[in-house]
Amino acid sequence: MSNWMDLMTEAMTGDTTDVVATHRLLKQCEEAAMAEVQALLGSSEEVSAAMTSLYGALSAYVQAVTLRAKAEGAEPGDLDHAFRTGQSYGVSCVLNHLIDDLVDPNSGSILASLDEFSDSLHNEITSQVDEAGLTVEVLDAKGDMI
């Protein structure tokens, strides 16, 4: 198993003019770090509880950002709406494209059941992207290009 910290250091201190090679290193870093998280997740119920709490915190953050946009009166297509949508989309991608890939073997874990919840959050966000007429490429909750 690759050491994700070494890969991160190499990517951040190496030749950053070779964007493709740096991207490849960062993807290897991501995979190594997620493999480590997966191994730790299977090691104890405390890690399981911590991951579930992190999931809850990230989900609450996504919803808080979305509500803040509504409270600020952001209209689809304006700069504030685009910023808040991008902010919540980024965090939602962490939930849907990283954390949802984890398998929690601990009994009583609710991590898998949270996947459907985070999918619904992500779908709400991507509908805001459509509503605003933003032309950036976005991924759905399962990582497929919309």
Image (cartoon, helix red, strand yellow):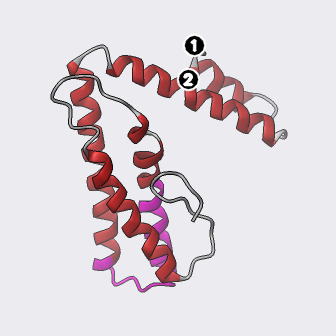
Q: Amino acid at mark 2?
A: Ala
Q: Which mark is residue 32?
A: 2
Question: In terms of secondary structure, what is the magenta stretch mainly?
Answer: helix
> In the rendered image, which quarter is residue 29 located in?
top right
Locate residue 88, reporting x and y percent.
41, 61
- For this rendering, which residue is in front, 51 or 106? 106
Question: Depth check: 45 or 65 in front?
Answer: 45
Mark 2 crowd level (few <14, some 14–19, many ≥20, 10 Å Cα): some
The CA distance from mark 1 to mark 2 is 7 Å
The answer to whether 27 appears left or right of 109 in the picture is: right
The residue wearing badge 1 is 1
Residue at 34% x, 61% y: name it: 121
Q: Is residue 16 visible?
A: no
**Which quadrant of the figure contains the C terminus?**
bottom right
**Relative to residue 73, is residue 60 depicted above or below?**
above
Magenta segment includes 89:
yes
The residue under the point 21% across, 29% down is 49
* Circle count: 2
Tag shown at residue 122: none
Q: Residues within 10 Å of mark 1 (few under 14, many from 20)?
A: few
Q: Amino acid at mark 1?
A: Met
Using the rendered image of the protein, determine whether residue 13 is visible from the camera's viewpoint: yes
Residue at x 56%, y 55% (from the top left corner): 144
Please say whether residue 76 is one of the residues in the magenta stretch: yes
Please report contact status of discs 1 and 2: CB closer than 8 Å, yes or no: yes
Which stretch did the figure color magenta? 70-90
Q: Quadrant of residue 123?
A: bottom left
